[in-house]
């Protein structure tokens, strides 16, 4: 059993994988934004909990790794001659954060658990997409899945360390239900962590997946 399967309460729908595998090219912009956001979330946690030096050191390493992923995705986009267009984030992260407790110490625990869930979902989706994509991107996504599995474990480790007397596994199950709903229910946008599209995806003027795949391999 993969690490993420231990905490995600619902798998990604096949319909999401089908659409994402076909339209992976426009999804790269959101992927780049997710890597950037993962780094900035880690930095925000370092600032929020300066007394927890074990967490700070672990997250400093994680933030560097996420920024390296961001660079790699941007280089991939440059190779594909894709301009970096501004894109509104999907509903996923902001909706999850609405469930974070406002008072400590529950707040810190919730932030660790949500971090673990986001990393676990990323890991699952990289694994699902990797075999469906052209070789440079497929191999890249396989590497990223391994990194996200480590990140998921790091957040779980720190959740456990900060749980105190609380039933952190029960809280994890509650938040995992919210996460599963967001990752599987009908959604209006195709994003890396979106639910299943409620209407057919329209790629607009972008080149098709086949042409993009040729560009990547050549
Ligand atoms: Fe990453
Ligand atoms: Fe990550």
Image (cartoon, rainbow, N blue to C red):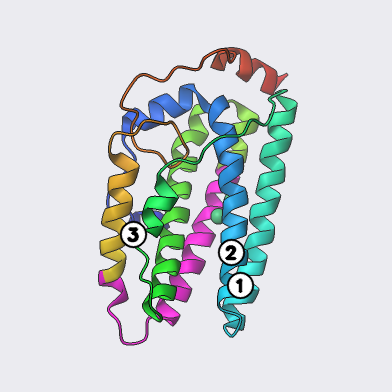
Tag 1 and tag 2, C-beta contact below 8 Å: yes
- Circle nearer the N terminus (2, 3): 3
Q: Quadrant of residue 213?
A: top right
Q: Is mark 2 within 8 Å of ligand 2?
A: no
Give the residue pinned by disc 2: 42
- Residue 102 lies, in percent from the top left, at 38, 72
Image quadrant for the N terminus? bottom left
Give the residue pinned by disc 1: 46
Q: Is residue 1 visible?
A: no
Q: CA separation, marks 2 and 3?
A: 23 Å
Q: Is mark 1 within 8 Å of ligand 2?
A: no
- Is residue 117 placed above or below 53 in the rendered structure? above
Give the residue pinned by disc 3: 6
Q: Residue at x 64, y 30 (%)?
A: 85
- Secondary element at image label 3: helix
Q: Is residue 19 magenta?
A: no
Q: Is residue 57 left or right of residue 114?
A: right
């Amino acid at each position: 059993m993969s690490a993420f399967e231990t905490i995600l309460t619902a798998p990604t729908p096949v319909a999401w994988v089908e659409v994402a595998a076909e339209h992976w090219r426009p999804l790269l912009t959101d992927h780049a934004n997710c890597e950037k956001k993962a780094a900035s979330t880690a930095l925000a946690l370092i600032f929020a909990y300066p007394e927890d030096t074990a967490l700070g050191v672990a997250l400093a390493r994680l933030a560097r790794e996420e920024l390296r992923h961001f660079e790699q995705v941007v280089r991939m986009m440059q190779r594909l001659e894709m301009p970096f267009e501004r894109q509104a984030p999907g509903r996923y992260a902001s909706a999850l954060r609405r469930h974070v407790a406002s008072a400590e110490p529950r707040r810190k625990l919730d932030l660790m658990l949500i971090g673990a869930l986001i990393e676990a979902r990323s890991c699952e989706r990289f694994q699902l997409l990797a075999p469906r994509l052209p070789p440079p991107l497929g191999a890249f996504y396989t590497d990223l899945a391994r990194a996200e599995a480590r990140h998921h474990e790091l957040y779980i480790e720190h959740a456990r360390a900060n749980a105190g007397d609380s039933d952190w596994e029960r809280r994890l199950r509650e938040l995992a239900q919210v996460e599963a709903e967001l990752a599987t229910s009908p959604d209006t946008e195709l994003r890396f962590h979106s639910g299943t599209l409620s209407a057919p995806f329209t790629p607009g003027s972008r080149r098709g997946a086949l042409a993009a795949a040729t560009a990547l391999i050549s």
